[in-house]
C-alpha cells in the first residue's frame, strides 16, 4: 500500500454552482418575539443571513484552498477505500507519530491552528517542547476521503487507521488522539490495535470526549448518578439530530444535499450549541471564514450524506457499549473541556471501568471543538499527556 500526494482542487465550476444556490435561497419568515436571535428555535435567521452574505461577497474559496494546500495531503487505498490524510514529518523526524481523528460536524481542518506548534515547536517559538509527526485523516465519507458503498463506522475505521499507520506509513508504534467520532475511533484503536494488548501499533490514546461506556455498568456514586441524569437531559434537549442521523440518515440527506444554505444551518447550529462561547456569540470564538471552510469541505465534496450515514454505521457496530468482558488496557488520557454540552465529562470512577487511565486533566475553558476553540490549551494538553507517558 502506497501513499500518493494529493492537492485540493478549487473546482471553480462547482463553487459557482454553490453560489448560485446560495443566492437563490427562498428565505422564509423567522419567529416573532425576538427569540430567533437567541437561537431558541434552532439556527438563528439573522446570523445565517449574515453568514450567507459573507459567503457570497467576501469569502475567498481559492485563497482558502491555497491555505489548505500549505501542508502535505495524501491518499492511499486501504482495503479498497481511498483514505485522505495530512502527513507532516515534523521536528520529531519520525520518532513520535501522533494520529488525530476529527468528528462530525468537523473535519481535518479542526486542527489547523495546532499543527505548527505540535509539528514544529522550535520553528513556532516553543523551543524545548516535544515535537510530533502528525497524521490527520478525514473520516471515511468525509471531505476528500472515499465514500464507503456499505456502512462503515468507528470500529472499522480504527482497523483502517492501524493499517494506514503501520502498513502504509511504516510506523511501528504511534499515539492517537480524538474527540467526537475521533474519541470512538481512538478508543477502538486502543482496544483492538493497542500494543498493550499485543494487537497492533497504538501505544497510548487521549480523548477529549467520552468514548466507551462500560458494559452493564450502573451508576454507583452520587457523582456518577448526577452525570447519568445530566447526560440524559442533554440528549433530550440536543439529541434529536443524533436520532435522525442514526436512524434515517438518507431521508435527511435528500433535503440537504442540494442546499448549501440548509447544510450551513444544520452544521453551524451545532457549532453554536456545542462550543464554549462568550455570551452566546458565535463570533467570540470563530471567524466566519473558519466555519465556512469547514463547511465547504462537506459541500464541495457532496459529503453530507456519507458523513451522517456514519451515525447509523456506529449503531450497527453496537454503539458505545464495550463488548462484555472487554477493557481497554492501552494507557489512556482524558481531558475535560468544561464547555462540552451534550456529552460532558463523566466522573473518573466511571471512565476507569472501561479504560486504563494514566492521565486525567481539566481545561479552564473550551468545548466540543477544543482544538479549534482553544488551540493554545489543546496544544499544552497534548504535550502534557505525551510527557506523562
Image (cartoon, rainbow, N blue to C red):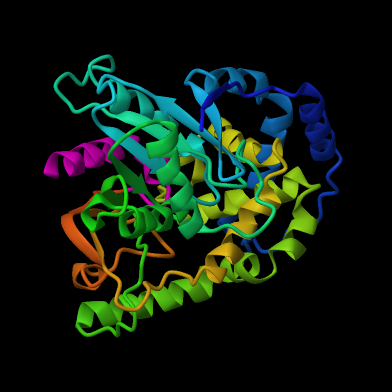
Q: Is residue 280 visible?
A: no
Q: Nearer the viewer, residue 280 or 253?
A: 253
Q: Residue 376 sits in which quadrant?
A: top left
Q: Is residue 303 above or below residue 135?
A: below
| Residue 116 highlighted magenta (yes or no) | no
Question: In which quadrant will I find the C terminus?
Answer: top left
* 193 relative to 86 in the view: left or right: left
Q: Nearer the viewer, residue 32 or 133?
A: 133
Q: Main secondary structure of the magenta part?
A: helix
Q: How many numbered markers are drawn?
A: 0
Q: Residue at x 29, y 37 (%)?
A: 172
Q: Residue at x 45, y 51 (%)?
A: 159
Q: Residue at x 30, y 54 (%)?
A: 199
Residue 129's x, y, as percent? 17, 26
Residue 180's x, y, as percent? 44, 55
Q: What is the residue that sits farthest to the top in this orientation? A: 123
Q: Is residue 65 visible?
A: yes
Q: Is residue 316 above or below residue 309?
A: below
Q: Residue 381 sits in which quadrant?
A: top left
| Boundaries of the magenta span | 366-389
Q: Residue at x 39, y 24 (%)?
A: 88
* 264 relative to 168 in the view: left or right: right
* 255 relative to 84 in the view: left or right: right
Residue 294's x, y, as percent? 57, 38
Residue 295's x, y, as percent? 62, 40
Q: Is residue 331 above or below residue 246?
A: above
* 151 relative to 226 in the view: left or right: right
| Residue 374 highlighted magenta (yes or no) | yes
Q: Nearer the viewer, residue 204 or 260?
A: 204
Amino acid at each position: 500500500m502506497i501513499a500518493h500526494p494529493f492537492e485540493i482542487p478549487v473546482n471553480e465550476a462547482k463553487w459557482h454552482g454553490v453560489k448560485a444556490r446560495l443566492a437563490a435561497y427562498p428565505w422564509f419568515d423567522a419567529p416573532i418575539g425576538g427569540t430567533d436571535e437567541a437561537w431558541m428555535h434552532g439556527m438563528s435567521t439573522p446570523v445565517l443571513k449574515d453568514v450567507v452574505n459573507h459567503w457570497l461577497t467576501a469569502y475567498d474559496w481559492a485563497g482558502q484552498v491555497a491555505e489548505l494546500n500549505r501542508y502535505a495531503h495524501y491518499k492511499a487505498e486501504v482495503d479498497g477505500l481511498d483514505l485522505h490524510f495530512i502527513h507532516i514529518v515534523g521536528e520529531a523526524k519520525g520518532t513520535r507519530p501522533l494520529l488525530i481523528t476529527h468528528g462530525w460536524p468537523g473535519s481535518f481542518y479542526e486542527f489547523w491552528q495546532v499543527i505548527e506548534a505540535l509539528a514544529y515547536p522550535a520553528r513556532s517559538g516553543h523551543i524545548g517542547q516535544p515535537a510530533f509527526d502528525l497524521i490527520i485523516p478525514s473520516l471515511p465519507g468525509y471531505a476528500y476521503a472515499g465514500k464507503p458503498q456499505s456502512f462503515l463506522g468507528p470500529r472499522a475505521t480504527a482497523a483502517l487507521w492501524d493499517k494506514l499507520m503501520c502498513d502504509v506509513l511504516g510506523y511501528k508504534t504511534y499515539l492517537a488522539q480524538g474527540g467526537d467520532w475521533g474519541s470512538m475511533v481512538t478508543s477502538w484503536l486502543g482496544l483492538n490495535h493497542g500494543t498493550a494488548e499485543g494487537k497492533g501499533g497504538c501505544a497510548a490514546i487521549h480523548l477529549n470526549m467520552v468514548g466507551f461506556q462500560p458494559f452493564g455498568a450502573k451508576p454507583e456514586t452520587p457523582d456518577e448518578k448526577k452525570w447519568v441524569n445530566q447526560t440524559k437531559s442533554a440528549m433530550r434537549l440536543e439529541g434529536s439530530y443524533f436520532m435522525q442521523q442514526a436512524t434515517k440518515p438518507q431521508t435527511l440527506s435528500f433535503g440537504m444535499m442540494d442546499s448549501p444554505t440548509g447544510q450551513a444551518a444544520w452544521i453551524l447550529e451545532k457549532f453554536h450549541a456545542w462550543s464554549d462561547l462568550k455570551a452566546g456569540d458565535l463570533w467570540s470564538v470563530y471567524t466566519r471564514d473558519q466555519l465556512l471552510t469547514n463547511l465547504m469541505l462537506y459541500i464541495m465534496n457532496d459529503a453530507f450524506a456519507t458523513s451522517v450515514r456514519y451515525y447509523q454505521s456506529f449503531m450497527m457496530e453496537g454503539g458505545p457499549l464495550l463488548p462484555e468482558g472487554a477493557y481497554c488496557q492501552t494507557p489512556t488520557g482524558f481531558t475535560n473541556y468544561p464547555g462540552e454540552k451534550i456529552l460532558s465529562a463523566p466522573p473518573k470512577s466511571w471512565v476507569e471501568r472501561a479504560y486504563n487511565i494514566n492521565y486525567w486533566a481539566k481545561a479552564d475553558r473550551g468545548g466540543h471543538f477544543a482544538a479549534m476553540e482553544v488551540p493554545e490549551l489543546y496544544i499544552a494538553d497534548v504535550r502534557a499527556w505525551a510527557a506523562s507517558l
